Image: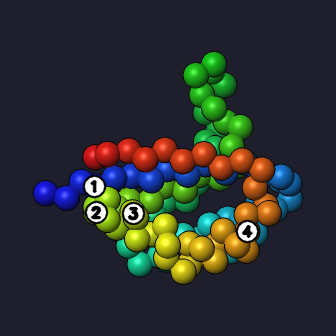
Amino acid sequence: MAQKLIHQVFFWLHKESDLKEFLTDAAPMLGRCADVAQFILGTPAPTEKREVVDHSFHVSCTLFFDSLEAQAAYQTDPLHLEFIEKYSHMWKTVKVYDIAI
């Protein structure tokens, strides 16, 4: 059976004023990539402030892949590359966590 995985991406933007454009135009491009099985876009939840909770990011993208090969293909998908080229100037930091499921 193929190794399924979750590709969790967190973005910290340079300017909070870019948030709306990033949520409506930029990040949804990732969900339209051919090998993405499921895509969830979000922002920090208004949960209680606790030492173990990180609310500092602006946008989170959760992408599900049906195999390691699908995730590898996503890395070179033209839409993914266009997203990076067009919008990378908006973020100051991006963190990725890949989770085997």
Residue 76 showing in the rendered view: yes
**How many numbered marks have been drawn onto this rendered protein structure?**
4
Are discs 1 and 4 less than 8 Å apart at CB?
A: no
Alpha-carbon distance for marks 1 and 4? 28 Å
Q: How is the image coloured?
A: rainbow
Q: Earlier in the sequence, mark 3 or mark 1?
A: 1
Q: Which residue is mark 3?
A: 71
The kind of residue on which mark 1 rests is Lys
In the rendered image, the quadrant that contains the N terminus is bottom left
Are discs 3 and 4 less than 8 Å apart at CB?
A: no
In the image shown, does 34 or 56 lie closer to the viewer? 34
Q: Nearer the viewer, mark 3 or mark 2?
A: 3
Q: Is residue 35 above or below residue 66?
A: below
The kind of residue on which mark 3 rests is Gln
Alpha-carbon distance for marks 3 and 4? 20 Å
Residue at the outermost left position: 1
In terms of secondary structure, where does tag 2 sit? loop
Q: Earlier in the sequence, mark 2 or mark 1?
A: 1
Are discs 3 and 1 less than 8 Å apart at CB?
A: no
Q: Earlier in the sequence, mark 3 or mark 4?
A: 3
In terms of secondary structure, where does tag 4 sit? helix
Q: Which residue is mark 4?
A: 87
Are discs 2 and 1 less than 8 Å apart at CB?
A: yes
Residue depicted at x 66% and y 25% = 49
Alpha-carbon distance for marks 3 and 2? 8 Å
Alpha-carbon distance for marks 4 and 2? 26 Å
